Amino acid sequence: MRVLVTGRDGQVARALAERAAAQGVTVVPLARPELDLSAPETILPALRRAGGDIVVNAAAYTAVDRAESEPELAQAINGTGAGAVAAAATALKIPVVQLSTDYVFEGTSERPYRESDPVGPVSAYGRSKLAGEEAVAAVTLD
Ligand SMILES: NC(=O)c1ccc[n+]([C@@H]2O[C@H](COP(=O)([O-])OP(=O)(O)OC[C@H]3O[C@@H](n4cnc5c(N)ncnc54)[C@H](OP(=O)(O)O)[C@@H]3O)[C@@H](O)[C@H]2O)c1
């Protein structure tokens, strides 16, 4: 199996690559500038060139505090960009895995959050990640 992983140099992508190597799974890491979530036109060609069985979208704008002063960039990468990754994966007929975060919730729960809990982000970062989840769901849950 060839697993395409965006966000090559990030924490999640590096951890996945390490684990995959131990399991004999081939990971194809992808990064800017070849695949740039803020330039959606780069995504489908990059995924097509890499040729994989599944794509894990581990690329994201993760500067939680800075997102308050540049919410449009966070939205472009985490919202529109994530949706574009899902659309490209769908075009290539491969599944996509999108990563969520605790920031899509309000943050006051006294127990660990469940996927079915109501969302309610209170930060620009959380709102951008939620936008990405909604964009991915809109493409993949048709
Ligand atoms: N790490 C955690 O504990 C954790 C917890 C909950 C959820 N998550 C989720 O897991 C995902 C990955 O998080 P992470 O911790 O691995 O983040 P990270 O270490 O900050 O890595 C993010 C990666 O995304 C890349 N990136 C940023 N903007 C991009 C763009 N426009 N196009 C393409 N790549 C871009 C970065 O590339 P550059 O190196 O070029 O900047 C970086 O390699 C995120 O969706 C995050 O919400 C992570």
Image: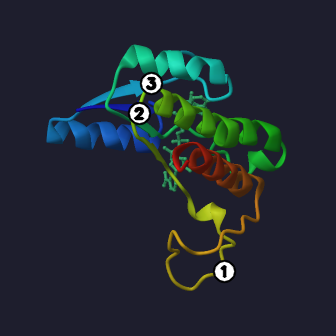
| Mark identifier at residue 13 | none
Residue 25 position (above or below residue 46): below
Give the amino acid type for the residue marked by disc 1 in the picture: Thr
Marks 1 and 2, how far apart at CA: 32 Å
Q: Residues within 10 Å of mark 1 (few under 14, many from 20)?
A: few
Proximity of marks 3 and 2: CB atoms separated by less than 8 Å: yes
- The picture quadrant where one finds residue 122 is bottom right
Q: Which of marks 3 and 1 is nearer the N terminus?
A: 3
Proximity of marks 1 and 2: CB atoms separated by less than 8 Å: no
Q: How crowded is mark 3: few (under 14 residues within 10 Å), some or many (20 or more)?
A: many
Marks 3 and 1, how far apart at CA: 35 Å
Mark 3 CB near ligand 1 (8 Å cut): yes
- Counting from the top left corner in percent of width and height, residue 10 is at 48, 37
Q: Which residue in the protein does label 2 denote? A: 5
Give the amino acid type for the residue marked by disc 2 in the picture: Val
Note whether residue 45 is visible.
Answer: yes
Q: Viewed as shown, does residue 141 lie left or right of 121?
A: left
- Counting from the top left corner in percent of width and height, residue 79 is at 68, 43
The colour style of the image is rainbow
Q: Which residue in the protein does label 3 denote? A: 30
Q: Is mark 2 on a helix, strand or loop?
A: strand
* Figure quadrant of the N terminus: top left
